Amino acid sequence: MRILIVDDSAVMRRIHKNTLLENGIDESSLIEAKDGEEALKIAIEEDITLFLVDWNMPRLNGLNFVKEIRGYSKYSSTPMIMITSEAAKYNVIEAIQAGVTNYVVKPIQGNILWEKIKKYL
């Protein structure tokens, strides 16, 4: 299992990582990227089984990352959870149309995040 955490905020990446670690996910399964461009490079080199993606990031934002990564056959159905402060209904619809599997609005508590994640592991 390989989980890619994509967020430009080191604090948010740490929160997501700690949630996973607290629920028994091995640290060696976790990979971090600070933006969509870095995440894309990692995804091409690795076999990712779950993506946790922020929307607002520099260089390549989360929505465009989702659209791009869904174009790769190996990621056509890989679970992808958008974790973002973009809470408007039209944002949720746009993300789902782009290929997001689930959508979580920040700020989020670890136990709620885990409930969203665990069904994909």
Image (cartoon, rainbow, N blue to C red):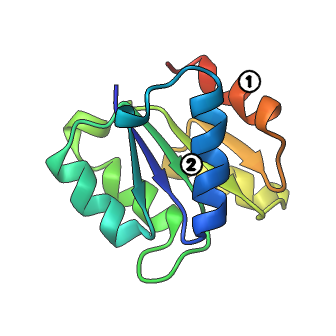
Residue 30 % position (x, y): 41, 40
Say if 1 sits above or below 87 in the image.
Answer: above
Q: Where residue 111 sits: x, y (%)? A: 80, 29
- Mark 1 falls on what kind of element? helix
Residue 110 locus on image (x, y percent): 77, 37
Q: Position of residue 26 (x, y in %)?
A: 44, 27
Q: Residue at x 60, y 16 (%)?
A: 119
Residue designated by label 2: 97
The numbered mark at residue 61 is none
The quadrant in which residue 28 appears is top left
Please state if 2 lies on the left or on the right of 95 as rendered: left
Q: Which residue is mark 1?
A: 115
Which quarter shows the N terminus? Answer: top left
Q: Could you tell me the amino acid type at mark 2?
A: Gln
Q: Is residue 119 above or below residue 65?
A: above
Which residue lies at the image location 20% right of the left edge and 43% below the top edge? 46
Q: Which amino acid lies under the numbered mark 1 shown in the image of this protein?
A: Glu
Q: CA distance from mark 2 to mark 1?
A: 23 Å
| Up/down of 78 relative to 91, above or below | above
Judge the density around disc 1: few (<14), some (14-19), many (≥20) Cα neighbours within 10 Å. few
| Residue at image location 63% in from the left, 22% down from the top | 23
**At 53% across and 46% down in the image, what residue appears?**
52
Circle 2: element type: helix
